[in-house]
Image (cartoon, rainbow, N blue to C red):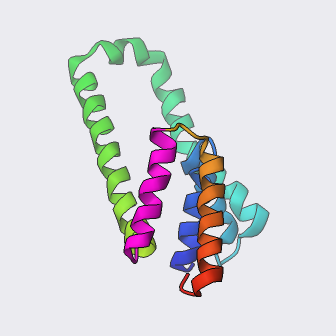
Amino acid sequence: MSDARFIAGYGLAQTLPGPLFTFAAYLGAVQTPAPNGWTGGILALLAIFLPAWLLIVGALPFWAWLRAREGVQAALRGINADVVGILLATLYTPVMTSAIMMPLDAALALACFGMLTVWRLPPWLVVGIAGGIGWALSAGTGMY
């Protein structure tokens, strides 16, 4: 799969609820070897949910006991911190390294961030605005 196709799917998945699950289905659908298409998408979606379901089924009877243990609480705090680091690393590579090529790209990314955090616009609208700006820039300069 090309970097552009990967980034396009990643960006679109971020606009929907449950972006990691949506992205898993996207990757299963667009992969080159079979199964792909609808079958690959459904298999990938099932595969990403399976570990969580197995964990729930296995841990639910003991959850109250587990949650009261200090070691488990510390592990969960560490896991949460790790997830933030992994998401930041993913933001940098491949997203920023393949999408931010010139100062105008960085300005557009910062403007989109502002639309999401300061003006609290819905993600689907920000994606539409950014896509429109990107289309206008590509039509005018031929650089994009």
Main SS, magenta residues: helix
What residue do we see at 59% from left, 42% from top? 18
Depth check: give the residue in front, 73 or 100.
Answer: 100
What residue do we see at 41% from left, 56% from top? 110
User: Residue 64 appears at what percent x and percent y?
Assistant: 40, 12
Specify the quadrant that holds the N terminus. bottom right
Q: Quadrant of residue 33?
A: bottom right
- Any magenta on residue 101? yes
What residue do we see at 29% from left, 44% from top? 82
**143 sits to left or right of 80:** right
**30 sits to left or right of 59:** right
Residue at the limit of the structure toward the right, as seen here: 38
Specify the quadrant that holds the C terminus. bottom right
- Any magenta on residue 109? yes
Q: Which range of residues does the magenta coloring cover? A: 100-118
**29 sits to left or right of 10:** right
What residue do we see at 41% from left, 63% from top? 107
Residue at the limit of the structure toward the front, as seen here: 140
**3 sits to left or right of 103:** right
Residue 24 appears in the figure: no
Q: Is residue 70 above or below residue 106?
A: above
Depth check: give the residue in front, 119 or 62.
Answer: 119
Residue at the limit of the structure toward the bottom, as seen here: 142
User: Residue 86 appears at what percent x and percent y?
Assistant: 34, 52
User: Residue 125 appears at what percent x and percent y?
Assistant: 65, 48
Residue 81 appears in the figure: yes
Q: Is residue 101 above or below residue 28?
A: below
Depth check: give the residue in front, 60 or 100.
Answer: 100
